[in-house]
Amino acid sequence: MSTQAFYAAETGVNDAAELINTAIANGLPVADKPSCSPDPGGFYAGLNPTISATDGVAYTCLIVDTTPSSLIYSTVGTTGTVIPVIATSGTIGSIQLTWQSKGGSATPAATCPTGTTSVFGTTGSWSCGYGVLRFDLLPSSVAYGITTLRTSTMTAFVVPLRPGSVGTANPVSYAGGGASDLQGVVCSNSSCSLVINFAAPQSQYYMRITSLYKDVSLQVTAYAAANASGASLSLQGAQALIDVTGKARDVLRRIQVRAPVAGAGTNLLSDYAIQSAESICKRFSVMDGFSQNDASNALPGVENTTTNPLCKPYP
């Protein structure tokens, strides 16, 4: 009965998430459901909470918040996660990124680097319990051309440092065009955190987040003031916080899920300029005062073979 109650709660989550995403896909407004009370004639009126009347299985309470005060992602890895950070009102003065280890170690920061110099090696050589957080951050309330898009995107690699180390500026100021591309954040054994301040706050931003070396869990919180101070802002268009209680006769199970809304979540585009399942032959040669896009000019008569250093198979 406990398993049945749990599945009933999951059914409620799926029903609510499907209803929300269908409405968004059709350009319709989405409503919150702040209490367990029935929603007659409202947005959630069409849901049927009864799974099996004969067995007494149903979800008895459904609560939905479509504008939560923080965004939580249970797993961020090497595949990009697209995160809209859009305030329901006002402008965003700062964004705080907090990530935690998923490795299970009680002291994940103990073996982290002590600085940002020469830290990027192979995955096998990375012993820190936290991943290196990479983010691409762009204000999205204005239109961009290709040049301003490039110069306005802030891309940074945030290296977790062990306690006692000296990190870079934290908070860091938003800066596009590679001005703040490497950051070092001193972590505790519970989490790492970076705050990004905006000199000219806007109402919405988009981020693409990845974690190198180790998967992490991530929380994103936005504030009206700089330095992540004051009350956090409600955020729309990214996640719905769905809270459901399932019941099987006299057994109850309650779960809370952050469900992505339409258009947010895993990046459906490649995170790379070129991505291939096979070796890529880089058919060009470059030297001082000369460039040529034919590899045979580098090694005459040798093309697309394993002996050509420009066409070596992927190891």
Image (tube, grey):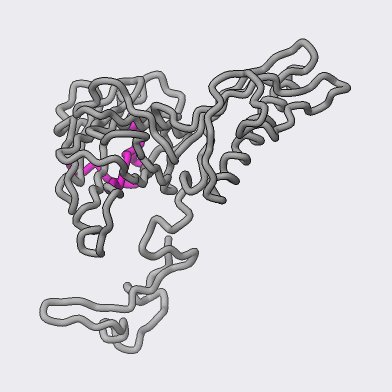
**Quadrant of the snapshot with the C terminus:** bottom left
| Vertical position of residue 15 compared to residue 207: above or below | above
Residue 276 magenta: no
Q: Position of residue 13 (x, y in %)?
A: 63, 31
Q: Position of residue 219 (x, y in %)?
A: 38, 30
Q: Which residues are magenta?
A: 116-137
Toward the bottom, the furthest residue is 301
x 28%, y 46%: residue: 137
Q: Is residue 29 left or right of residue 180?
A: right
Q: Is residue 217 left or right of residue 294?
A: right
Tally the marks.
0
| Vertical position of residue 56 compared to residue 257: above or below | above
Q: Position of residue 129 (x, y in %)?
A: 37, 30
x 41%, y 78%: residue: 305
Q: Is residue 43 visible to the viewer in this orientation of the structure?
A: yes
Query: Which one is in front, 307 or 158?
Result: 158
Toward the right, the furthest residue is 54
Residue 133 magenta: yes
Q: Position of residue 260 (x, y in %)?
A: 51, 39
Toward the front, the furthest residue is 41
